[in-house]
Amino acid sequence: MQALCSTKTNCLDLLLQQIDEKREEMIQIGMKTGYTSDKTVSCSQELDQLLNQYQRELYKREVGRKKVSYFKQVILYFFGAKYNLKPAQPTDYHRFINY
């Protein structure tokens, strides 16, 4: 079930494609064999694994973004005055950060 990809965006796109395909497969199996059949349940579990993997990838991306954001805030706080980058209010740091 592991998606092979070269970039984070490509990985998320590939996962979304696999999720859509698995969802369609599950629906088709469910219509043929019943929604509580072993085949349908197995397919549903595979879909759950793909969805969990997608959520993990999104979480990793968000955590990485927060680390960079925090680093930018620290740099602005300590070096902002030297380069006249310090905002007027401490709460204005978000204006200098690209999300």
Image: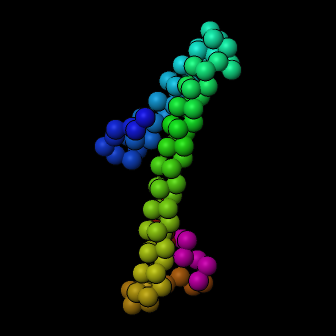
Q: Is residue 6 left or right of residue 22?
A: left
Q: Would residue 91 be visible to someone looking at this image?
A: yes
Q: How many labels were placed on the picture?
A: 0
Q: Would residue 85 be visible to someone looking at this image?
A: no
**Between residues 47 and 7, which one lies in front from this camera angle?**
47
Q: Quarter of the image holding residue 36?
A: top right
Q: Quarter of the image holding residue 92?
A: bottom right
Q: Is residue 94 magenta?
A: yes
Q: Position of residue 17 (x, y in %)?
A: 46, 30
Q: Position of residue 93 (x, y in %)?
A: 54, 76
Q: Position of residue 39 (x, y in %)?
A: 57, 19
The quarter of the picture where the N terminus appears is top left
**Between residues 70 and 39, which one lies in front from this camera angle?**
39
**Between residues 77 and 15, which one lies in front from this camera angle?**
15
Q: Position of residue 74 (x, y in %)?
A: 46, 81
Write the residue at 34% across / 46% down. Answer: 7
Write the residue at 48% across / 85% down. Answer: 77
Write the residue at 49% across / 73% down. Answer: 70
Q: Height in image: 87 above or below 35?
A: below
Write the residue at 44% across / 88% down. Answer: 78
Q: Is residue 44 magenta?
A: no
User: Tell me, what colour scheme is on the image?
Assistant: rainbow
Q: Is residue 49 left or right of residue 3?
A: right
Residue at the left extreme, as displayed: 6
Q: Height in image: 21 above or below 87?
A: above
Q: Quarter of the image holding residue 5?
A: top left
Q: Height in image: 11 above or below 30?
A: below
Residue at the bottom extreme, as displayed: 82
Q: Magenta span: helix, strand or loop, mainly?
A: helix
**Between residues 90 and 66, which one lies in front from this camera angle?**
66
Stretch of the chain drawn in magenta: 90-95
